[in-house]
Image (cartoon, coloured by chain):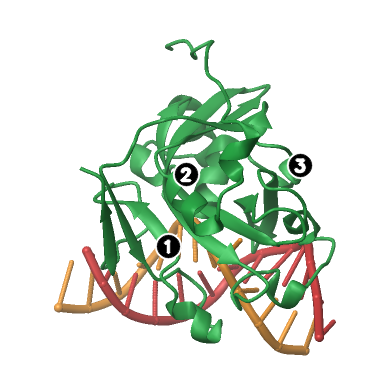
Chain colours: A green, B red, C orange
Amino acid sequence: MQEFPKDMMPLPQDFYDQPTLELAKALLGCLLVKETTEGITAGYIVETEAYIGPGDKAAHSFNNRRTARTEVMFHRSGLAYTYQMHTHCLFNVVSGGEERPQAVLIRALEPWYGIELMKIRRGMESPIGLTNGPGKLTKSLGITKEDYGRPLTLPPLYIANGFSPESISAGKRIGIDNAGEARDYLWRFWVTNNKFVSRNQKSEYVFDFK
DNA sequence: CTATAGATGAGCT
DNA sequence: GCTCATCTATAGG
């Protein structure tokens, strides 16, 4: 197997100190890295969703709801917010700053490093299904509730520079039909035409950077 | 390719 | 007890 680059550097704290909608777009193309005793796995972020509590009915922090689960959302940006959904673990990046409980859900990756380990963890051979969904990518990378509250500026779980998308698409978030008005907010972002996105959807807006 | 049903368990009212 | 920020298998076009 190829060697993991020794000069891979986590993005600094100030990267996370930008408005949540900006951060959700800035994360596209970045590399998400997880180191475990089994090995290193990493993939490029290709799909995100913004959750902007307390005014966002789809957010766990709606109405400033503060519980053991949502506690980390009230802390500084750049921490990991992991939680269990049905039988899966989902991974978010805390944003918004202290006492502003917001987050960016990572919904899909393009596998880049440690693909053999991902295949073992997922029990499948095809690369396309390894990380094209929020519950799938955490299983492939070995992200668990143990990672709750970890700073993303340091190993074993961190985000580094990757590629710059030529175009970003935006549309409605997925799986929040119970969220009233908030269900129509265009707070889902993905790398245009990337085949590792969790599902296809007509984009309402396109941000072109060519 | 799309649509749908069922499994599933932590978190909260 | 009720609610899900999901996934997989299966059936059908």
- A47 with respect to A137 (left or right): left
Residue A65: percent from the left, percent from the top? 78, 73
Q: Name the residue rendered at 63%, 23% in the picture.
A: A38
Label 3's element? helix
* Residue A146, disc: 3
* Residue A188, disc: 1
Q: Name the residue rendered at 34%, 36% in the picture.
A: A164
Mark 1 vs 3: CB contact within 8 A: no
Label 1's element? strand
Can residue A133 be seen at all in this image of the molecule? no
Q: CA distance from mark 2 to mark 3?
A: 22 Å
Residue A128 falls in image quadrant:
top left
Q: Is residue A177 above or below residue A49?
A: below
**Tag 2 subunit:** A
Dot 3 amino acid type: Glu
Q: CA distance from mark 1 to mark 2?
A: 12 Å
Q: Share a chain, discs 1 and 3? A: yes
Please state, as top left, top right, bottom left or bottom right, where the N terminus of chain A lies in the image: top left
First in sequence: mark 1 or mark 2? Answer: 2
Q: Share a chain, discs 1 and 2? A: yes
Residue A188 falls in image quadrant:
bottom left
- C4 with respect to A71 (left or right): left
**Tag 3 subunit:** A
Residue A85: percent from the left, percent from the top? 64, 62
Dot 2 amino acid type: Leu
Q: Residues within 10 Å of mark 3 (few under 14, many from 20)?
A: few
* Residue A73, disc: none
First in sequence: mark 1 or mark 3? Answer: 3
Dot 1 amino acid type: Arg
- A165 with respect to C8 (left or right): left
